[in-house]
Amino acid sequence: MKQAVLAALLVAISSGPVFADTPGSKNARVTLVYEHALPDLPGKSIKGVLVEYGPGGYSPAHTHPKSALIYATVLEGAVKIQVNQGPVRTFKAGENFTELPGDHHGVSANASETEPSKLLAVFVVNTDETELVTPDPK
């Protein structure tokens, strides 16, 4: 089941909108690959976001909507993640992590300077949320 869901999301990659070049990012591409309202939870949706980092790529420190519960799986390579001032951790392909509503994402980066990495972030979020990433103010 898990592989089937991932495969279905990855098939949609070419048709989703791309949010590349978020201010403060480097060598990063973010693509909405899936979106569906949850039938038994009015006002809630599931949204799949593919994050692709080139070598040395990263996203700026950011938050997600306060309604967002996020489950992320590393699909390729390895990524460095820091949530809520905790330790910076490295997650390799096949490993996953969770972000809870209101969490702050201090570090989100490719762990390699020479190889690309990819992760799939699955959001359970209010359906009307359109901005899934809010970079920290400078």
Image: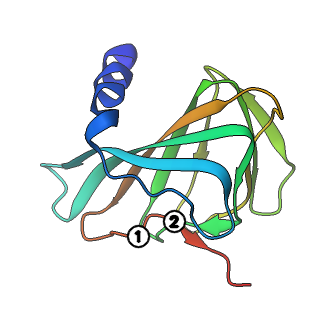
Taking 48 as reference, is 121 left or right? right
On the question of residue 109 being in view, the answer is no
Label 2 – label 1 distance at C-alpha:
6 Å
Q: Give the class, few, some or many, for how many residues have Cα within 10 Å of label 2's Cα (few <14, many ≥20).
A: some
Q: Is disc 2 in contact with disc 1, using a CB cutoff of under 8 Å? A: yes
- Could you tell me which residue is drawn at 44 percent across and 64 percent down? 132
On the question of residue 97 being in view, the answer is yes
Task: Give the camera-side residue of 13 and 104.
Answer: 13
Q: Amino acid at mark 1?
A: Glu
Color encoding of the figure:
rainbow
Q: Amino acid at mark 2?
A: Val
Task: Give the camera-side residue of 112 and 84.
Answer: 112
Which residue carries the number 1 mark?
131
Residue 18's spot in the image, x, y percent?
40, 52
Which residue carries the number 2 mark?
133
- Element under label 2? loop
Q: Give the class, few, some or many, for how many residues have Cα within 10 Å of label 1's Cα (few <14, many ≥20).
A: few
Quadrant where the image shows the C terminus: bottom right
Q: Compared with residue 19, is residue 6 higher up or lower down, i.e. above or below?
A: above
Give residue 110's quadrant in the image: top right
Residue 79's spot in the image, x, y percent?
72, 37
Task: Give the camera-side residue of 63 and 26.
Answer: 26
Residue 92's spot in the image, x, y percent?
71, 24
In this view, the residue farthest toward the right is 87
